[in-house]
Image (spheres, rainbow, N blue to C red):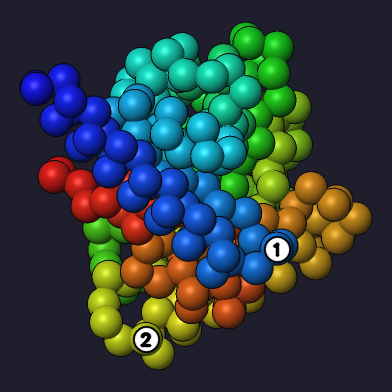
């Protein structure tokens, strides 16, 4: 009896995650990539999404990610999406596919060092501070330009800057969210022109979460990071 009840609950959950995933994929145009944000969720939930054919997942805690990665299929592409502390880079450097939230030169230098140690090239995005909230991290355009112009940056051979990332203010004001994403796109365009005009790999704008991904896509996002709309609300 108990096992049967568990099985039914499991099947309902499987259907929900897979249906949510399907719905989100239909809402996203072909050129936009989906990162399914699985932070705080158990590996069983990630496996369900994987079994439905999805391979890109995002986590925002280095140790949580390092704990999950070996227990799941090895062809999963892992994205680190949150604020990364320098002393945690080593946990994810052996396998991470894209670090979205690079918000200081010192962090970039540490990622470079750990990438070299692992004989890897790690793809990174520069995070921009586009929201009005002070709690969010990220560069201004001037700061990003200064880094990219520096000799010290030229010496980092084991990282590749593939674009930008930003998080809009948590608000119901659509016009404000739109404006913030528009600013991110302007920063992307400026950097592309000045530093990466001939580099095909500089092409990603990571913007948009469950509550604002439609607006982000309209404003140029190439990569959306969606958690709760796929896996359900988080308890923390
Ligand atoms: C949690 C998180 C997301 C996903 O948020 P949802 O609202 O659950 O879609 C996206 N990006 C970052 C950086 C996050 O920390």
Say left or right for 207 vs 220. Answer: left
Q: Nearer the viewer, residue 77 or 46?
A: 46
Farthest residue, direction left: 2
Q: SS for tag 2?
A: helix
Find residue 133 and report its image quarter. Answer: bottom left
Farthest residue, direction bottom: 175
x 9%, y 22%: residue: 1
Q: Is residue 185 above or below residue 111?
A: below
Whether residue 86 is visible: no
Find residue 86 and report its image quarter. Answer: top left
Say left or right for 42 vs 73. Answer: left
Say left or right for 195 vs 74. Answer: right
Q: SS for tag 1?
A: loop
Tell me the crowding category of disc 1: few under 14, some 14 to 19, or many 20 or more residues within 10 angstroms, Cα based. Answer: few
x 14%, y 30%: residue: 5
Tell me the crowding category of disc 2: few under 14, some 14 to 19, or many 20 or more residues within 10 angstroms, Cα based. Answer: few
Find residue 194 and report its image quarter. Answer: bottom right
Please provide percent x and percent y for residue 217.
57, 72
Question: Which residue is identified by label 2?
Answer: 174
Please provide percent x and percent y for residue 138.
43, 55
x 31%, y 54%: residue: 228
Which numbered circle lies on residue 30? 1
Please provide percent x and percent y for residue 51.
51, 32
Give the CA distance from mark 2 to mark 1.
24 Å
x 22%, y 35%: residue: 8
Whether residue 107 is visible: yes
Q: Is residue 161 above or below residue 191?
A: above
Q: Nearer the viewer, mark 2 or mark 1?
A: 1
Q: Work out whether mark 2 precedes mark 1 in sequence or the reverse, and give the earlier one.
A: 1
């Amino acid at each position: 009896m108990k096992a049967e009840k568990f099985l039914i609950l499991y099947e309902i959950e499987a259907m929900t995650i897979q249906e949510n995933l399907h719905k989100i994929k239909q809402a996203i145009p072909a050129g936009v990539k989906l990162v399914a944000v699985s932070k705080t969720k158990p590996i069983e939930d990630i496996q369900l999404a994987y079994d439905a054919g999805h391979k890109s997942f995002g986590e925002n805690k280095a140790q949580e990610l390092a704990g999950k990665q070996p227990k799941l299929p090895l062809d999963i592409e892992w994205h680190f999406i949150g604020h990364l502390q320098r002393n945690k880079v080593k946990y994810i450097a052996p396998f991470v596919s894209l670090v979205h939230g690079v918000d200081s030169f010192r962090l970039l230098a540490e990622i470079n060092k750990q990438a070299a140690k692992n004989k890897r090239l790690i793809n990174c995005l520069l995070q921009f501070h586009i929201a009005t909230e002070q709690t969010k991290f990220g560069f201004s355009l001037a700061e990003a330009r200064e880094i990219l112009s520096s000799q010290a940056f030229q010496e980092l051979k084991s990282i590749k800057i593939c674009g930008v990332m930003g998080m809009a203010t948590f608000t119901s004001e659509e016009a404000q969210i739109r404006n913030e994403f528009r600013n991110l796109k302007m920063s992307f365009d400026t950097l592309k022109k000045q530093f990466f005009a001939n580099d095909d790999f500089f092409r990603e704008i990571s913007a948009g979460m469950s509550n604002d991904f439609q607006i982000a896509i309209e404003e140029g996002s190439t990569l959306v990071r969606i958690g709760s709309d796929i896996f359900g609300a988080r308890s923390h």
